[in-house]
Amino acid sequence: MGYLKRRLEFYKRAQKRIKSLKEGPETTSIRLGDVICVWGDTGPIYGVVTEEGVVKNCILLSPELFLAGDGLLLRVEHLVNLLRVTPINFYLTPSTQRACEVIGKLKQEDLTKVVGNHQKLREENWTGVRKEFFEYETKRIEILYDMFLEFLNQIEQSESQTVTLRWDELKRLFEEKDLELIFPDVPVAQSSAVDLGKFLIVRTESGIRIIFSDELISKTGKLTLVGKTIYSGRIPPELFITFENPPAVETLKNILNVDVGAERE
Amino acid sequence: MSKELDREILKFLEDRKVTPTLEKMLREIVSFNLVDILGRENVLKIFGNEKSAVDEIFQDVLGAFWEKRSEILTRNIDNLTGYLVKSVENKIYDYARSKKRKKVLSLDSISDSESEESTFLDFIQLEEETRRDPLEQILAEKNFEALRDLFSGKEKDLCDFFYKKLFSDEKTNIFASGKTVQARYKSHERLAKRIRDFVMENGITEAEFSRIVEIYMSEICEKIRQNR
């Protein structure tokens, strides 16, 4: 067995797959160029932040200098001293940032060199032991990819779960007498929410949120306001009507209704 | 072993006591990795003797863990063996690379000051290549040994192959040993395939391979040539 192959076998035995991240008491503020240690349950994950945003793109830095190829080296003061640039990248979501410790910062010119080196390494055709090492590293830090996917799913779900309607467009459905009902002259008590069982009405600064009960979600039905259908189809978890000056929930509770099984008028 | 070691490291971080068990286990890990990564010859070159080498890495690793104890303890990390092994290996790589003695952190003089941690930010820098990296040289020597073993008994053929590829003057035929052009061509074809397989299997880069060939030519081919 070649030396690198043997080294890889040792490495796999000592560096197990990371199953959970170990959070600290505070969320760390992470910026472009920061060199970080993500504390995992079985070992550290080192990286450098190359793109900022809600999710931060990072290049994986490896303390295993023989197996990790011939990328650039960075000197740090941590449990380890030298880290090698790899062709692997990962993402830090907001929830992973509590497991991070910033251990240094790269100057812009060095960051540019590191990013360039990473790109070059990605273009190389890694074979044999080195390829196996990079594949193992990707599996070892798989938890970060899973958390990233989970984060994307959450965003997608929260976007698809809310149906938004605009009052400017809806108001054309109503006659003057209906509008007087919706926006009465007499002031009413201004509570911010009312639970009607089938749905909850919440008044916000920019509109009205209608949150449907679990048994209605996904059923076919229609939502009416003063008897006029303002939405029909599959009942979403939440419907939001944008208003410049949202009406009181006390008014809406008497004129807003949902009918299941009656999609069209 | 790792569960016991985990407990011992935690004990050290909590009570600042290096138990005989921790000392024994850590010294064994250091000793094994020193020889595996550097080889005995390099250990002697860098540290003078193996005991000093183990002492230095042992102190250095415990010092690094002590510096990070609040991070480790507040994060409730109980599986510390992975961290420890990584630290040992990396410190050895660093010694091999710098080939110079570093400040040994005495546990008695360790400070709790947080301001010391903030100065770490000033430390980070890219390791610029100004000379041949000793670490790469060590890896090349390890890979050279693998290549030498793989072509044991075929040294002359391999030297002939390398000389033919590298030289265009009279040196080219030094190792040809009166073979016909066709026999030599076929032999080179077979060697090229085996070398390609060796490079692919080990994931060796072009620069690394050049270094291996350099060592092979100086350690094997030159010696054969001089003995003729």
Image: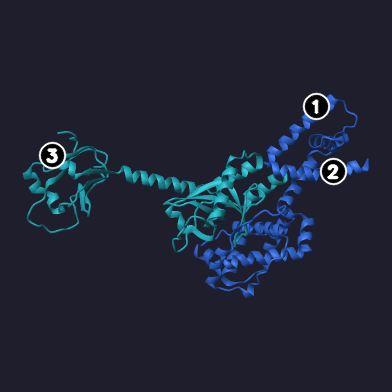
Q: Which residue is mark 3?
A: A173
- Residue at 25% from the left image edge and 44% from the top image edge: A164
User: Chain A: what color?
Assistant: cyan
Q: Nearer the viewer, residue B137 or A199?
A: B137
Quote the CA–CA distance across marks 2 and 3.
93 Å
Q: Callout 3, which amino acid?
A: Leu
Q: Chain of mark 3?
A: A
Give yes or no for contact between labels 1 and 2 (Cβ–Cβ under 8 Å). Answer: no
Mark 3 neighbour class, 10 Å CA radius: few under 14, some 14 to 19, many 20 or more? few
Q: Residue furthest right?
A: B228
Question: In 3D space, how far apart are the residues under numbered discs 3 and 1 (Cα atoms)?
Answer: 89 Å
Residue B35, placed above or below residue B162: below
Q: Between marks 1 and 2, how big is the CA–CA gap?
A: 22 Å
For numbered disc 3, what is the local secondary structure? helix
Q: Chain of mark 1?
A: B
Residue situated in front as seen by the camera: A97 or A6: A97
Task: Give the color scheme: rainbow, by chain, secondary structure or one colour.
Answer: by chain
Q: What crowding class fits label 1: few (fewer than 14 Cα within 10 Å), some (14-19), or many (20 or more)?
A: few
- In the image: residue B118, left or right of residue B51: left
Q: Position of residue B97 (x, y in %)?
A: 70, 57
Residue at 62% over, 41% down: A131
Q: Residue A35 got which mark?
A: none
Residue receiving disc 2: B220
User: Which mark sits nearer the N-terminus, 1 or 2?
Assistant: 1
